[in-house]
Image (cartoon, coloured by chain):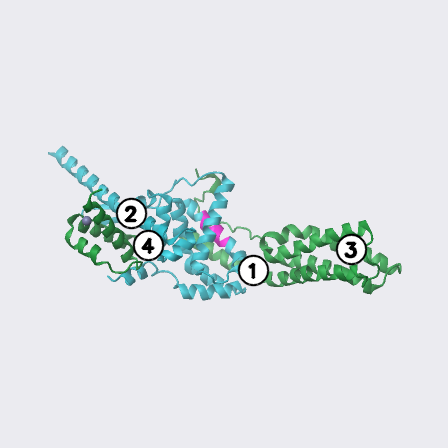
Chain colours: A green, B cyan
Amino acid sequence: MTGDDTNCTHAREWLCAYRDDEADDDALARSHLDTCNNCQCWSATFDRVTRHARLRAPMAPAPVTATVTRIAREAPPVRHATFGRVLLGIAAASGPLVLILDAAGVFGHSHLGSTDGRHADVLTTALYGGYALAAWRPDRLAAGLLPVAVLAAAITLALSVVDVTSGAVSILDELSHLPLLIGAAGAAVATRASQPVAAPPTDRTTHTPIAHSV
Amino acid sequence: MSRRQTRHDARRRTLADHDADALARRASRGDSDAFAALCTGIHHDIWRYCWSLTGDRDLADDATQETFLRATTAIGRFRGDAPVRVWFVVLARRSLGDTLDRAKRAPVPADPVAIPVRDGTGYVDLGALITALAPDARQAFVLTQMLGFSYADAAVAMDCPVGTIRSRVFRAKSALVDAWHADHHTDAAHETNAEEASE
Ligand SMILES: [Zn+2]
């Protein structure tokens, strides 16, 4: 590359950034542009191309505008995700606390002595971890967690009803299952809030589905 | 024409950044009117960006629709760390990537966007020149020239250093200037041949 080429490239690079408000003045580049015929020709075309690109930027076609307007009107932004996340967060935080109290024997018998009890606690802890993850990213994880959370809450509730009505345990003892109920409710609310919205049909008469447009 | 004026021209039909960000914050709290105003205000920019990703009108239409569908649930996570226009552009890039992954293909322009520009005695199709750019250069050019992004915002949108944006914009503009000149030489050659043939 000759010295002239280097000067031309430097001056053009500077002009490009300078026109975009992304470079300070550069006396060397400016003086080169003032004296180099090639760069003056280049910069005239450069300004013309840039001006046309800015003034003639293509607009979204009318059917796309109509579709976007309809999406915005018919699928308002998520409102309830916060409530669902709060419920999931409460369940995720209170669950381990309840497990510790349970281990200490606050809710009747401690499970720590039995292998089965410890296995059950491991599964419950995993579920609480799921609540925490779903509270973090409800749009991605709440729906996946929902069936497990609802089944766990329903089965636990059914067993509790049987135990309490048979007098085997008191209602106070069964409060340890409250995080499971709150978690299931949180997963349901967050899932509802994060439901994927069905695509409204486009107005485009020549609509080409993305999978078949080639 | 001042430098700031030219930057302003790129946005003359769209929302100012601070207005768009204020609408986005309201929309993230569930304000549906704000969300509708935001979508209407920036959808031309998002369509332009989707076009710059693909070079294809139909793909841009589909990607724009998918982006705004996703935005209805994703806007709740907007925290205002970056301008909402940047946030939307990133969402558009991911939407298009997922859509193409599902379709298991790369974007192949089938329905290019024409931007006929009268220059001297003939016309130049600026849309075709832009579509012919390398994809990275094309995106950087559209973001900074047609959407009015600063290089820093474009760097966030394209997930690369600011210096890379600077060189991509320069490469794009240099290629466009060369192509513009080449087009004119071709036109001139055609005209000369036509004149010779008629003699
Ligand atoms: Zn020069």
State which quarter of the image contains the N terminus of chain B.
bottom left
Q: Which amino acid does label 1 sit on?
A: Val
Q: Which chain carries label 1?
A: A
Residue indicated by mark 2 = B126
Residue indicated by mark 3 = A156
The structure residue drawn at horizontal position 50% and vertical position 45%, both measured from the top left corner, is: B98
- Real-space CA distance between mark 3 and mark 1, rounded to the nearest whole angstrom: 31 Å
- Real-space CA distance between mark 2 and mark 4, rounded to the nearest whole angstrom: 13 Å
The residues colored magenta run B62-69
Q: Is residue B48 visible?
A: yes
Instruction: Say which of marks 2 and 4 sits in front.
Output: 4
Ranked by sequence position, the earlier of labels 2 and 4 is 2
Q: Is residue A2 on the magenta stretch? A: no
Q: Which amino acid does label 2 sit on?
A: Leu
Q: Does the residue labelled 1 lie within 8 Å of ligand 1?
A: no
Q: Are marks 3 and 1 on the same chain?
A: yes
Query: Callout 3: helix, strand or loop?
Result: helix
